Image: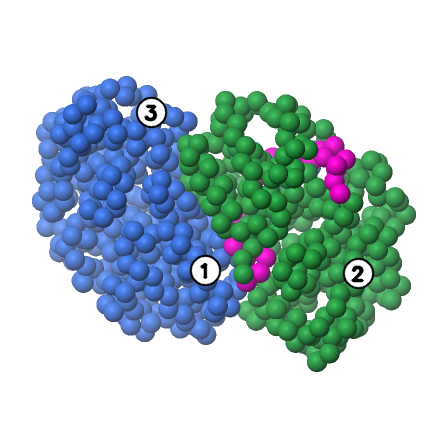
Chain colours: A blue, B green
Amino acid sequence: MVVPIALTSSAPVTYDITIDTLPGLTFDRKVAIVTNPTVSPLHLDYVLERIDAPHIEVIEVPDGEEYKTLETVEGILERLFEARFDRKSLLIALGGGVIGDMTGFAASVYQRGIGFVQIPTTLLSQVDASVGGKTGVNNAWGKNLIGAFYQPEAVYIDPHFLGTLPKREFAAGVAEVVKMAVMFDAEFFRFLQTHDLRTPEAIREMIRRSVTLKADVVNQDEKEAGIRAVLNYGHTFGHVVENETDYTTYLHGEAVAIGMVMANELAQRLGLLSVEEAEAIQDVLAANGLPTTYQVVDVEGFYEHFFLDKKSNRGAITFILPGGRIGTHVVRNDLDPQAVKDALAVFGGGQ
Amino acid sequence: MVVPIALTSSAPVTYDITIDTLPGLTFDRKVAIVTNPTVSPLHLDYVLERIDAPHIEVIEVPDGEEYKTLETVEGILERLFEARFDRKSLLIALGGGVIGDMTGFAASVYQRGIGFVQIPTTLLSQVDASVGGKTGVNNAWGKNLIGAFYQPEAVYIDPHFLGTLPKREFAAGVAEVVKMAVMFDAEFFRFLQTHDLRTPEAIREMIRRSVTLKADVVNQDEKEAGIRAVLNYGHTFGHVVENETDYTTYLHGEAVAIGMVMANELAQRLGLLSVEEAEAIQDVLAANGLPTTYQVVDVEGFYEHFFLDKKSNRGAITFILPGGRIGTHVVRNDLDPQAVKDALAVFGGGQ
């Protein structure tokens, strides 16, 4: 006999992303703020002044992508057990993408899932990482290879935090903004070309448009079965760059900038992007202080690295490329490996 | 401004639980069978004969509740990375509840979630653990405190496997069957009282009715926000028994049997169960070789242990009890601690 399971209780997930000064937040349950020693002295008081809860635990984890590990997540969980957090308790991620990814993953597995809220403090996490429910950690095999799709209860994007953000971190966020524009919105790309992106007005506009574009994609495809993969433009190459350099040389956004330039080289060779457009993209990246070159010392080794990437579905590697011009996209998993290697060879590699 | 997120792509989860001889299964993707050295020599060949896939990896993990840890799950993940499993790959849990819980959890976090199939080989996992998508591991703080709600793609319950099941393991499964009957179905309880439960016909009937009852509960309440908590009858006490005895003295089902007897003592004191019914339940448990006594050496210590249990919501402890007679249930989180301690004291404790 067959007993059917149909989970009628699983309602659609909905929540709001608020782009504004952090409002006062009142919770009737235990709250833990997960942050790091870089963010904490700058912004913890600002947040604590705005949060009311019966118990507030502050959990600091070491700062840096190299600490985005299962071990750090276990440390967060241990603190929650010690403080007797229960199924109704709440985690708040206060920091950049690394803090958000680990806090979300910790929330997803603590007692099979508790609530969490994102308060992103970097441009990158405000425009990208805090939206969409991807959580997880890195390991020796690569980035974000262990994790969960787990949506927050709310996201609060307060541009105030960016006042203390180092230039290099700001630029890393711009890389993800450029990604959204190149893939989805030519008019937005022109905005990025023609504005000083450090002004408060430009920052607010970048956040507003990036978050709106990303929310639209995530709403259609939470689990990355289709269009969400387009958000990986620049990431397939970028992840290998990060991995080859042990995650220490480049910030994630910097590696994505390099990855977009690599993807554009491939796109040009396939007739999917004009030389002028590829240069325009590279110019916007460079104008905002992002790296656009990388020394590929071993093309075969670089190519082999793709196979560990989550996007390598059943042995085929998926490339996200502009779809003929800026503001459009294609997803290709049928490319001749030699075409990819030829594009990589331009970046200084020999075979 | 506020950007709303509404995940329109999250369709309701549906899958089938098949109670029958394992059919031939064909997959067009990499498959890993997770099992242990006890189950493997008995049943692996039987399963391999029925599975067709381009690549089949067999992952053995140590047998026993004490190995149901994050470390073991990490070992499973490591094997998947080594074998270059991708997002389309599939895990198959071949074993009892421990294997099912760890395999499901590994599947839930590998590359943010891959598919898994349950092939439960013990009565306990066939009637209970394999149905409903609870996955996870134990840690120093208690049982199943780290995990996820993650549904399988399919569950195949083949009574054939029970032919080699040790008597004690079989009895442990009967405990969960008794639980379902006492909570939901007086007529089913009478069936359990009046039949030799070792016959093939009785086994099939136990599986059919338990799975149907459980599926009905899970379909209404996947995440245990309401009625699903009723399935924890016997477990609130049982988990403490397991924890106090380091998970080595009792099988899970045995601890649940003890826990039900404890819950019934409390229920009697609250007028929720007659002495005769409590004895009838104890008789069915004892007749099937289950323990029904336990030495509570420290009532206060035992009580304190409840607070670590996931069911202890915001400091209040939730007790699941018969609701006045067999076949009904109540959920109570308003009990006087002294009433609970008085019930515990019957089990030999002093204060």
Residue segment shown in magenta: B141-166
- Measure how far apart labels 1 and 2 are at the Cα level: 35 Å
Q: State which quarter of the image contains the C terminus of chain B.
A: bottom right
- Tell me the amino acid under the disc marked 3: Asn
Residue beneath the point at 41% across and 71% down: A56
Are the numbered discs 1 and 2 placed on the same chain, yes or no? Answer: no
Between A114 and B197, the residue placed more toward the observer is B197
Above-or-below relation of B111 to A58: above
Q: Can you identify the residue that label 3 sits on?
A: A333
User: In the structure shown, which secondary structural element does the residue marked by tag 1 occupy?
Assistant: helix
Q: State which quarter of the image contains the N terminus of chain B.
A: bottom left
Above-or-below relation of A122 to B303: above
Q: Chain of mark 2?
A: B
- Tell me the amino acid under the disc marked 2: Thr
Seen as rendered, the residue at the extreme bottom is: B351
Q: Mark 1 or mark 3: which comes first in sequence?
A: 1
| Horizontal side, residue A235 vs residue A292: left or right | right
Q: Nearer the viewer, mark 2 or mark 3?
A: 2
Residue count near mark 1 (Cα–Cα under 10 Å), binned few <14, some 14–19, many ≥20: many
